[in-house]
């Protein structure tokens, strides 16, 4: 009996040791070399292309392989290998989706049909959808909503940054509802490189965030945040117009195209930086121009880009397309025609080829965004600043234009009627009855309209200025965009929202303008 117990004990020990061996081998599995991983990627590519050509749904495998490549690029070979295992497994499990045979004429616009192949099924007025191939002539849903119908507009930049002030997207929705807002202006804005999600940042972008101490999750600074927020807003208020925003006057040293996932290094973005010598202009060098803007606008970690450069055109359109894919109905482009204006000042000649080509390139961006929206079955409203009307070229196909009171007008709480009448006359001469909006603009310092509004005016004066501006602009046929949330008050701002944020917020006790905004908005919405 004693010997039998010894044998059983020994048997158990052997099994335990074997299991431990398997565990240790699994845990301490050798990390594959760079060459081995390159070979695995090559093998995956062959299998992936074969499966895709045969009609298999390989999207899950593609996503795992993309993540594996990112891990490989940052030399995390163990993670890359695990993700490749998942990619191969997903390829193995991939299936060919069943595709129904479309039947044109059954009054159902099926997935394989569009306005080109079957207009009688797809181009139907009244279903709320403008499908590819349909036009305003055969589908009323393809007609853009008249922006002149907008009564109440507000700045809310960004609808995704609520974690910074303990405000959820549901809270934002309640604010929009109770003020009857139907145009959310600058609901999302990119200034630094912005990726699809915070959990899967390219290493180059992650390094930029770490250097700045930027918390991607708290800031709600990803297209996943945007898509989720807009979806929530649209569920509650399907008719609200959500306007995203992008800059045309800045490109970061490190950039990312959110459509292609391409990451640009500083050498590549420098190639896209504006150089007057491209047009034989030598009185201002590229270095002088870039240094000026780094001190007066773009900041020390970016360039003033060349709007005529094809790579930058792809990049800025990528920013717009990604916001559209995330649910944006409109895109406001900051500084879209600023290059044409800058080159006009440098040359002293509004008809200089550099000015004309810059103006035409900027106009092309508007057309491309409209075209992309149409391919997605909706009209995308595009707007920018008004000053392009002073250049002697055919008007761009803009849906709205924006203006701002000056710091002096805010400080004096008096709007210069002659100046505003002159601006409006120029806009009407060039753009006809295009909707015109005015908002309190901002930049990097307190020497801006919003900087003066928030830092120089008392709470009572801020409320009074909102009333003065709303009344003045209403009489001019201009929609005043209320400053509910957003706008950078300036790096040198000392009166901060909730005692900690340099982003203006009307509900912050330091400002307390929300109730005035709500009162003005409710009056306007009932007119």
Image: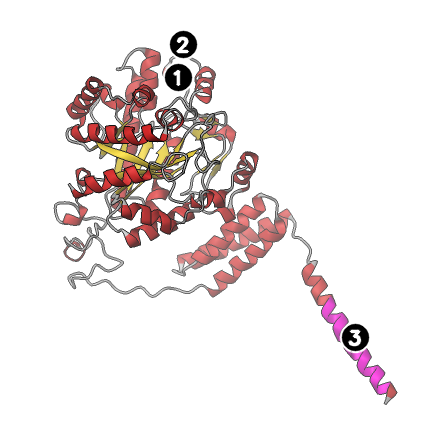
Q: Secondary structure at mark 2?
A: loop
Pointer 3: what residue? Answer: 13
Q: Is residue 35 visible to the viewer in this orientation of the structure?
A: yes
Instruction: Name the residue rendered at 60%, 52% in the picture.
Output: 79
Instruction: Name the residue rendered at 23%, 62% in the picture.
Output: 102
The x, y position of residue 147, in whole percent, is 20, 39
Image quadrant in which the C terminus is located: top left
Residue furthest right as drawn: 2
**Classed neighbour count for the residue bearing mark 2: other residues with Cα under 10 Å, few (<14), some (14–19), many (≥20):** few
Q: Secondary structure at mark 3?
A: helix
The circle drawn on residue 306 is none
Front: mark 3 or 1: 3
**Which of the two labelled residues, at mark 3 and mark 1, occupies the earlier sequence position?**
3
**Which of the two labelled residues, at mark 2 and mark 1, occupies the earlier sequence position?**
1
Find the distance from the CA under tag 2 to the CA under tag 1.
9 Å
The answer to which of 508 and 403 lies nearer the viewer is 508
**Classed neighbour count for the residue bearing mark 3: other residues with Cα under 10 Å, few (<14), some (14–19), many (≥20):** few
Residue 132 colored in magenta in the image:
no
Q: Is residue 257 above or below residue 88?
A: above
**Classed neighbour count for the residue bearing mark 1: other residues with Cα under 10 Å, few (<14), some (14–19), many (≥20):** some
Pointer 2: what residue? Answer: 283
């Amino acid at each position: 009996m004693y010997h039998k117990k010894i044998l059983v004990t020994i048997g158990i020990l052997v099994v335990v040791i074997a299991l431990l061996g398997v565990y240790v081998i699994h845990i301490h599995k050798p990390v594959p070399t760079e060459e081995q991983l390159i070979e695995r990627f090559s093998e995956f590519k062959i299998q992936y292309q074969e499966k895709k050509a045969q009609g298999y749904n390989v999207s899950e495998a593609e996503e795992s392989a993309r993540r594996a490549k990112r891990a490989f690029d940052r030399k995390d070979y163990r993670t890359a290998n695990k993700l490749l295992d998942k990619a191969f497994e997903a390829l193995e499990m991939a299936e060919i989706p069943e595709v129904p045979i479309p039947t044109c004429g059954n009054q159902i616009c099926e997935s394989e049909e569009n306005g080109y192949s079957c207009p009688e099924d797809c181009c139907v007025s009244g279903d709320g959808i403008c499908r590819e191939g349909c036009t305003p002539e055969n589908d009323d849903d393809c007609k853009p909503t008249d922006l002149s119908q907008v009564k109440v507009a507000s700045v809310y930049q960004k609808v995704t940054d609520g974690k910074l002030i303990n405000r959820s997207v549901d809270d934002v929705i309640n604010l929009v509802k109770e003020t009857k807002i139907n145009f959310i202006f600058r609901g999302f804005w990119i200034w630094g490189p912005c990726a699809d999600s915070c959990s899967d940042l390219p290493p180059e972008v992650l390094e930029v965030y770490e250097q700045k101490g930027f918390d991607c999750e708290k800031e709600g600074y990803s297209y996943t945040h945007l898509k989720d927020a807009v979806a929530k807003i649209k569920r509650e208020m399907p008719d609200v117009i959500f306007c995203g925003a992008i800059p045309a006057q800045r490109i970061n040293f490190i950039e990312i195209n959110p459509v292609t996932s391409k990451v640009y290094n500083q050498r590549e973005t420098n190639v896209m930086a504006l150089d007057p010598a491209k047009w034989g202009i030598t009185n201002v060098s590229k270095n002088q121009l870039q240094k000026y803007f780094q001190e007066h606008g773009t900041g020390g970690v970016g360039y003033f880009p060349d709007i005529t450069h094809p790579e930058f055109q792809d990049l800025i359109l990528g920013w717009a397309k990604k916001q559209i894919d995330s649910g944006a109905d409109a895109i406001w482009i900051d500084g879209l025609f600023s290059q044409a204006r800058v080159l006009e000042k440098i040359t002293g000649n509004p008809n200089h080829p550099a000015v004309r080509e810059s103006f035409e390139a900027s106009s092309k961006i508007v057309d491309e965004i409209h075209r992309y929206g149409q391919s997605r079955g909706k009209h995308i409203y595009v707007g920018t600043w008004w000053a392009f009307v002073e250049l002697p070229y055919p008007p761009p196909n803009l849906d709205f234009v924006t203006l701002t009171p000056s710091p002096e007008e805010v400080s004096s709480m008096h709007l210069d009627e002659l100046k505003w009448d002159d601006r409006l006359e120029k806009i009407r001469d060039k753009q006809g009855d295009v909707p015109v909006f005015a908002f309190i603009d901002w930049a990097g310092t307190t020497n801006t309209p919003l900087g003066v509004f928030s830092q120089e005016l008392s709470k009572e004066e801020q409320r009074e200025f909102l009333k003065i501006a709303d009344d003045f602009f209403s009489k001019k046929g201009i929609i005043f965009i209320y400053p509910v949330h957003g706008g950078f008050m300036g790096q040198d701002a000392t009166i901060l929202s909730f005692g900690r944020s340099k982003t203006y917020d009307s509900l912050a006790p330091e400002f307390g303008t929300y109730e005035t905004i709500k009162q003005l908005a409710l009056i306007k919405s009932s007119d």
